[in-house]
Structure formats: C-alpha cells, structure tokens
Image (tube, helix red, strand yellow):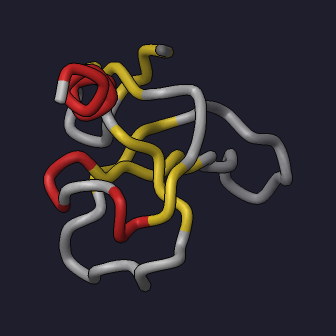
Amino acid sequence: MRRYPTNYDRWVELATFELPAKKVAPHHRWRLMRPRAANTPVVVATVAVRIGAVDPTPGEPVIPSHEFVCLRRDA
C-alpha cells in the first residue's frame, strides 16, 4: 500500500501492483500521472487520478485502491 495525493487535493491509498481493468470495480480504478514542470522534461510529482470519464479496455492495467484489495481478500 502506498499513499498518493490526488488531483483534487485529497490523499488515497493504492495497491503497489496493477490489475487488468476487468478485475477491478469501476469506482476503485486509479492511474498514476507524473506531471512535468512547464517547458522542461522534469517530473515534479506523482498524482493519483481516478479513472471515470473514459472506461479503460478490459485488459488495460489499472491500480486498484487499497479498499478493493482488502475486500477482495476477505471474500
């Protein structure tokens, strides 16, 4: 589990591995973005972004939230 800032000034705990999108419930799908400083190739941060507007393809890798991983192990 790792904690990342989100694109809307909150923090989220994500798993340290990726799963195919078809195995993760839609509201638990996240991606990590690495924005760059203006006019330079320097990465300034790592930000978690929830996948919502465009659904990923079933085989596309996504990072599940920590809640999803814990619920899945209990089931």
- Residue 23 occupies which quadrant of the picture? bottom left
- Front residue of 64 and 23: 23
- Residue 42 occupies which quadrant of the picture? top right
Residue 66 shows in this picture: yes
- Front residue of 8 and 71: 71
Which residue is depicted at the point 55% across and 63% down? 61
Find residue 43 and report its horizontal and vertical position in percent.
74, 40
**Does 64 appear above or below 19?**
above
Q: Is residue 44 left or right of residue 46?
A: right
Find residue 8 and report its horizontal and vertical position in percent.
20, 38
Residue 10 shows in this picture: no
**Does 14 appear above or below 34?**
above
Residue furthest right in the image: 41
Find residue 26 and report its horizontal and vertical position in percent.
18, 61
How many numbered marks does the figure carry? 0
**Does 31 appear above or below 47?**
below
Quarter of the image with the C terminus is top left
- Front residue of 12 and 63: 63
Q: Is residue 15 left or right of residue 5?
A: right
Which residue is depicted at the point 37% across and 42% down? 64
Which residue is depicted at the point 20% across and 68% down? 52
**Does 70 appear above or below 48?**
above
Which residue is depicted at the point 27% across and 82% down? 54
- Front residue of 43 and 3: 3
